[in-house]
Image (cartoon, coloured by chain):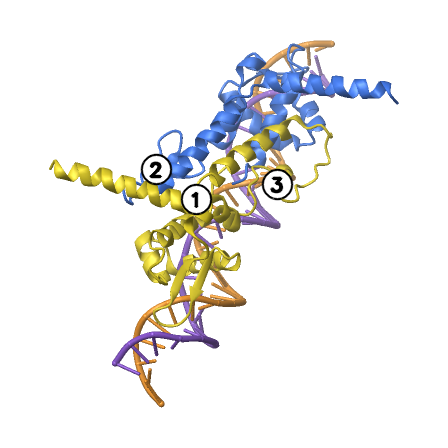
Chain colours: A yellow, B blue, C purple, D orange
Amino acid sequence: MKLSTKGEYGLRAMFDLAQRHGSGPISLKSVAARQEISEHYLEQLIAVLRKVGLVKSVRGAQGGYMLGREPENIKVGDIIRALEGPIAPMDCVNEEDPEECSRSGSCITRNIWRKVRDSISEVLDSITLQDMCDEAELERQKNDCYMYYI
Amino acid sequence: MKLSTKGEYGLRAMFDLAQRHGSGPISLKSVAARQEISEHYLEQLIAVLRKVGLVKSVRGAQGGYMLGREPENIKVGDIIRALEGPIAPMDCVNEEDPEECSRSGSCITRNIWRKVRDSISEVLDSITLQDMCDEAELERQKNDCYMYYI
DNA sequence: GTAAACCCAAGTAACTTCCTCGGTATTATT
DNA sequence: AATAATACCGAGGAAGTTACTTGGGTTTAC
């Protein structure tokens, strides 16, 4: 029931890009360094994100990556689905083309997996990269306040 | 983000026992046959469930397994946690002893994983084996009704 | 006594994860 | 024109996990 590092690293990288949105292309190297992720590995993940249009790339020196859409239009669910595949605690409740189960038609356990799937989707689709940036900003302000007291 | 067959088979087996609750010990062989699960493999899963008290066993001929508690007191979450470990889409939000993350203290992505974890837990802990039996009963009635029309 | 059941530990093939390695292509800068 | 910085690409591989199988015990109703 765990996410792989693909989803973890991918979201962190996208959040990193979101926080620098509007400042031109960001090099993969710098993202990898800040997020402490293997550069070559991150490359593979971001290639997937590029193919589905979640990021755009600029080649050559001073090139790099940027968000493919505005941060408020990128849901966490979009990123996770791109990297981890459709959300499905079980193949029989896969979001796209659920695997037919040879067993009894009215499967009680399947209803449970469906509920689990929907609750996960709901959480992931209710949060955008912009929401995350806003939260980070709030966090920063809180810390600034605290600093005055030292 | 998938459950393994441990959780799947384990829940199906427990549901099988729940539907026969009160009829004395049910042999593993019969459960495995009905649920189409390898007998030896199911044995390993049910051994875990026995150790945490979710099932009781009776040894010897005519022996078998039965629920360790009343079906209304066994939550789906209990079964899944026993077989798959604590619910955690990410180690840093593990229900029991979360793994400390060396990175920045205020981690925005962690809040997301926490929400995912909680929404999964909420679903799994809101359903008991009794609920599943009731649903199966309803399903049967629906089908009986339909039969009259044929 | 015997067969039906539970109990236990080890092994294993296939798969997945999480990378690494070594290279090519493109472009800004000098 | 040369250089360096970047993106792009494909293969490989060690370690761990999964989903079992194998091969035995032990207990007990009949």
The residue wearing badge 2 is B99
Residue flagged by tag 1: what amino acid is it? Thr
Find residue B67 and report its horizontal and vertical position in percent. 58, 16
CB atoms of marks 1 and 2 within 8 Å:
no
* Corner quadrant of residue B148: top right
Whether residue B67 sits left or right of residue D17 in the image: it is right
- Secondary structure found at label 1: loop
Query: Which residue occupies the extreme right position in the image?
Result: B150
Q: Mark 2–mark 3 contact, CB under 8 Å?
A: no
Q: Which mark is residue A128?
A: 1
Mark drawn on residue A65:
none
Q: Nearer the viewer, mark 1 or mark 2?
A: 1
Q: What residue would you read off at disc 3?
A: A94
Q: Residue at 78% of width from left, 21% of height from top?
A: B143
Subunit of label 1: A
SS of the residue at dot 3? loop
Residue A129 or A109: which is nearer the viewer?
A129
Q: CA distance from mark 1 to mark 2?
A: 26 Å
Tell me which chain the residue with mark 3 is part of. Answer: A
* Depth order, front residue of C21/A65: A65
The picture places residue B47, in percent across and down from the top left corner, at 55, 25
- Mark 3 belongs to which amino acid? Asn
The vertical placement of A52 against B65, above or below, is: below
Q: Amino acid at mark 2?
A: Glu
In the rendered image, residue A122, in percent from the top left (x then y), is placed at 51, 36
Between the C-alphas of marks 3 and 1, the distance is 23 Å
